[in-house]
Amino acid sequence: MSLSRRTFIKLAGATVVCTCIGALGTNGCAGNPTSDTSPVPVGSYRVQDGRVFVELSKVGTLLSVGGAVKLTLEDVNGSERKVIVVRLSEEDYRAFADACTHNGKELNYLHRKGLLACCGRGSRFDLAGNVIQGPAEEALSRYPARQEGGELVIEI
């Protein structure tokens, strides 16, 4: 089969466009579809009077700076509330709603980069919960967290 120069250029151009669109499509969702942050071990926390008490001795990943865990809490009406907890320093723990404000997808804690990343469309949040890269436009909900003795107390 013989192609004219014009037909060849059109086909080559279409190939380049399709390749770019394909790359953008997968790159736009390049985030991990599920989180790499591990769940808190069963039996290591309790909920009481609007607070979550996490027994730090039972949650190995929070024993060292840079660790993170996820909690799934059941509300009185049966719905779930997901929380991601990170340890930034010896005394600084942070707790956030574990849902991107753009699409509700789970978050990953990227300790080396110092941020929380959406598992979906690539939104990024600083460790105060503020958006540093969209498409998310709203900050994450943050819950006060403090260490009291051997427990981490999170106000929900």
Image: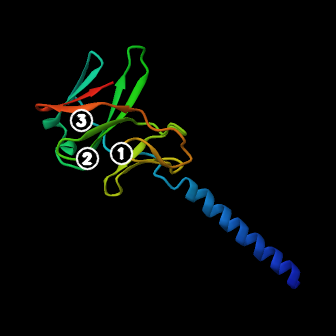
Q: How crowded is mark 3: few (under 14 residues within 10 Å), some or many (20 or more)?
A: some
**Residue type at the position of mark 2:** Leu
Could you tell me if the residues under marks 2 and 1 are in contact, i.e. CB atoms within 8 Å?
yes
Residue 7 in the image: above or below residue 71? below
Label 1 sits on residue: 127
Image quadrant in which you'd find residue 56: top left
Quadrant for the N terminus in the image:
bottom right
Relative to 132, say whether 71 is above or below.
above
Q: In the image, residue 26 lies at what x, y percent? A: 58, 58
Outermost residue toward the left in this view: 149
How many residues crowd mark 2 within 10 Å: few (<14), some (14–19), many (20+)? some
Q: Measuring 31% from the left and 53% from the top, which residue is drawn there?
A: 111
Q: From mark 3 to mark 2, how far is it between C-alphas? A: 20 Å
**3 or 1: mark nearer the eye:** 1
Vertical relation: 93 (above or below) 25: above
Which quadrant of the figure contains the C terminus?
Answer: top left
Observer-nearest residue: 109 or 60?
A: 109
Q: Percent x, y for residue 155?
A: 29, 25
Do the residues bearing badges 3 and 1 touch, measured as CB atoms within 8 Å? no
Observer-nearest of 16 and 134: 134
Which one is nearer the viewer's eye here, 109 or 33?
A: 109
Give the x, y percent position of residue 94.
30, 38
Q: Residue at x 40, y 36 (%)?
A: 98
Nearer to the camera, 95 or 5: 95
* Crowdedness near tag 1: few (<14), some (14–19) or many (≥20) residues, C-alpha within 10 Å: some
Dot 2: element: loop
Q: Residue 88 carries which label?
A: 2
- Label 3 or label 1, whichever comes before in sequence order: 3
| Residue drawn at 44 percent across, 43 percent down | 130
Between the C-alphas of marks 2 and 1, the distance is: 9 Å
Labelled disc at residue 41? 3
